[in-house]
Amino acid sequence: MAGKAERMGEQSGELGALPEWDLSDLYPAMDAPEVERDLETIASASTAFQDCYKGKLPALTKDAAGGDALGEAIAEYEDIQERLGRLASFAHLVYVGDTTDAGRAKFFGDVRERLTTISTDLLFFELELNQLDEELIEAAMSGPKLAAYRPWIDDLRLERPHQLDDTIERLFHEKSVTGRAAWNRLFDETLAELRFDVDGESLALEPTLNRLIDPDEATRKKAAEALVATFSGNLRLFTHITNVLAKDKAISDEWRSFKDVADSRHLANRVEPEVVDALVEAVRDAYPRLSHRYYALKARWLGKTQLEFWDRNAPLPETIDRRIGWEEARDTVLTAYGGFAPEMADIAGRFFEEGWIDAPTRPGKAPGAFSHPTVPSAHPYVLLNYQGKPRDVMTLAHELGHGVHQTLAADQGLLLSQTPLTLAETASVFGEMLTFRALLARASDATERKVMLASKVEDMINTVVRQIAFYVFERKVHLERRDGELTADRLGEIWTEVQAESLGPAIHLGPGYETFWTYIPHFIHAPFYVYAYAFGDCLVNSLYAVYEEAEGGFQDKYFAMLKAGGSKRHRALLAPFGLDASDPGFWQMGLALIEELITELEAMEQAS
C-alpha cells in the first residue's frame, strides 16, 4: 500500500508531511475511459429498468412470487443507485479539492447534469412504490427478499403525503441542476475565491478563520477586520443567494404540503418535530447556565469585563502555543479509539494507511471538514484543513468517527446504510469525547487540565449552543422570507439578535459581526441541518455517561448501533442503552455534563 500511504502534500515542516487522498478506488482520473464507460452503461441500465418496471408494480406484487419479485426489483434499483453514487462521489471529491479550477468545475457540473438526466428514468420507481395499496405491499413483504427492505420501504412511505404527480416530480428533479444546485455551486466557488487582507497578506477563508484562535489579540483583531471587510464587500451576492434559496424552499414546501419551514428536514431526519422542539427549548433555557456563564468566566481569565467577538475562541493565557504534528495527531486519535475498542482503531487506521484522507490547506480547496461515505462498495473519504491546532486534532477525531460509522453501516447496502443526520453525528461526537477523555487523563498538572477542560467546554458550546442559535436564525429568516425578500441589513439584525441571546452579555458583538452569517455553508447546502450537531452532542453526553457506568457489553451495543445504519430509528437504537430522546429529561442529562465541566472550571478559578 506504499503508493497510497506515501502520497503526501507539500505542507510539512513542523506538521510533518500531510496526506492527500487517493481517489483511484473510485476512478483513476477525470479523463479516465472508465468514467465515460460507466456513464453510458448506467444510462442504458436505467432506461432498461424503466422499460421493465414502469407501470407494472401493482401487477408485480399480485403475482405468485410478488414479494420476491418486488424485492429483486428493489435490489436492481439499489445496484443502479450504487453505480450512480460512485460517479457522483468521485465528481464531488475531485471538485472540492480545488473549487476554483475550471477543469474540475466543468467535470463536476457535466457529471452532475448527466446523472440528473440518467436518474430521471428512475424517478417513477419510488413514486409508484408509494402508490401501492398498503395491504398489498404488506402482504408482499411476507417474502424474505422484500422483507429485507422493510425499513427503507417504511421510511419511503412516510413521504407519501408530500409526494407530487409524477410529471411534477420529474420537473422538480430536472430543474434542480439549474435551480438549487446551481446556487449551491455559485456559493461554494465564491467562498473559495474570496481573499482576506490580513496585515498586508492575502489569505483564503480557512487560514483567516484560523487566526481567530491565535494567542495574540492584535492578530485576532486584524483577522476579524479582514473577514468583516471581505464579507461586507460581498453582502449583495450572499444576500441574493440566501433570498433565492429560501424562496426556492418555500415553493417546494408549499407544493409538498409541509406546514412548518423545518418539517421537511425533520422528516428526512426521521425525528419527530416535538423532539426537536424539546431540544431547542432545553438549550435556549440553558443559555445562561452554559454560554453566558462560561464567557463571563473566560472574560475574567483574559482580564476583561467583556470579550470582543474575535476573542470568543481565543486560547487561554496558560495555553502553550505549539502546533501538533500530523503523526502525533494520528497517534493520539488512534490510541484513544483503541482504548475503547481495538476494532475501532483498526478501522480508523485504514484511513491513514490507504490514502483516504486529504489534510493540507490549499488555495481553492473547500473549507471545513467532512467524511464522505461515497458508496458501500468503496469506502469513505475524509477532508480536513489541518493546521496543527488542538481543535484540528479534535476535528480529525470527529471525522474519523463518521468514517468508522460509515464503514460499519456499509454492510446494510446503499438503501439501508444512510443514517439520518440526527444519528449520523453520534459516532463523530463520541470519537471526539474518547479523544478528549484520553488526553485529559494524561494531563500533567492542574493548569493543563484547566486548559483542556476550557477547550472542551468551548467545543461543546460551539456544537450545542451555537448550532441551536444557527437553527433559530434559519427559522427566523425562512419565516420572514414568506413575506418578501430580506435586505442585508435585516439579515444582519436577525443574526446579531440571535447571537446576542445565545452568547450573552460577556461577548461584545461590535460593528461588522452582523456579516458573519454569510459564510456558513449549512444554511445554503442543507437548511436546518444544524440542530443535528446539538442533537448528537447531547445524545453522546448521555451515552458516554452510560458507558462510564457500564460493567460490560457497552462496546457490543455501540457497534450494533453503528452497524444498523439507517435501518432503525433513534428510539430503537437508543433503547438498549436505556435512553429515550422523547423524554424531556434526556436533553437535560446531556446539558448537565457541560454544566459540570463549567462548575469544575469555576472551582479551579476560586482555588487559584
Image (cartoon, grey):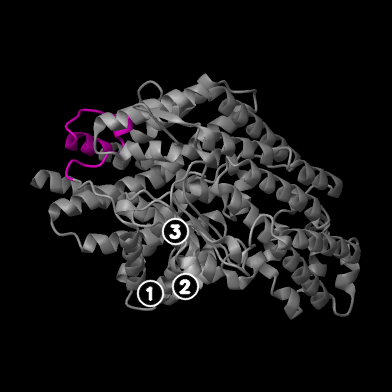
Magenta span: 295-318
- At a point 56% along the width and 33% down the height, the residue shown is 190
The quadrant the C terminus occupies is top left
Q: Nearer the viewer, residue 469 or 590?
A: 469
Which residue is denoted by mark 2 in the rendering? Answer: 559
What's the distance in space between the residues labelled 1 and 2, CA to CA? 10 Å
Residue located beneath label 1 in the image: 341
Q: Which residue does the image show at 28% across and 50% down from the upper left? A: 323
How many other residues sit within 10 Å of disc 2, few (<14), some (14-19) or many (≥20)?
Answer: some
- How many numbered marks appear? 3
Q: Residue at image x 36%, y 55%?
A: 394
- Sequence-wise first label, 3 or 1: 3
Q: Which residue is mark 3?
A: 8
313 is within the stretch colored magenta: yes
Are circles 1 and 2 on residues that touch, CB within 8 Å? yes
Residue closest to the far left: 608
What is the secondary structure assignment of the residue under circle 1? loop
Q: Can you tell which mark lies on residue 95?
A: none
Q: Is residue 179 visible?
A: yes
Indicate the position of residue 589 as horizontal and vertical percent values.
Answer: 36, 55
Measure how far apart labels 3 and 1 are at the Cα level: 29 Å
The earlier-in-sequence mark between 1 and 2 is: 1
Disc 1 or disc 2, which is closer to the eye? 1
**Which amino acid lies under the numbered mark 3 shown in the image of this protein?**
Met
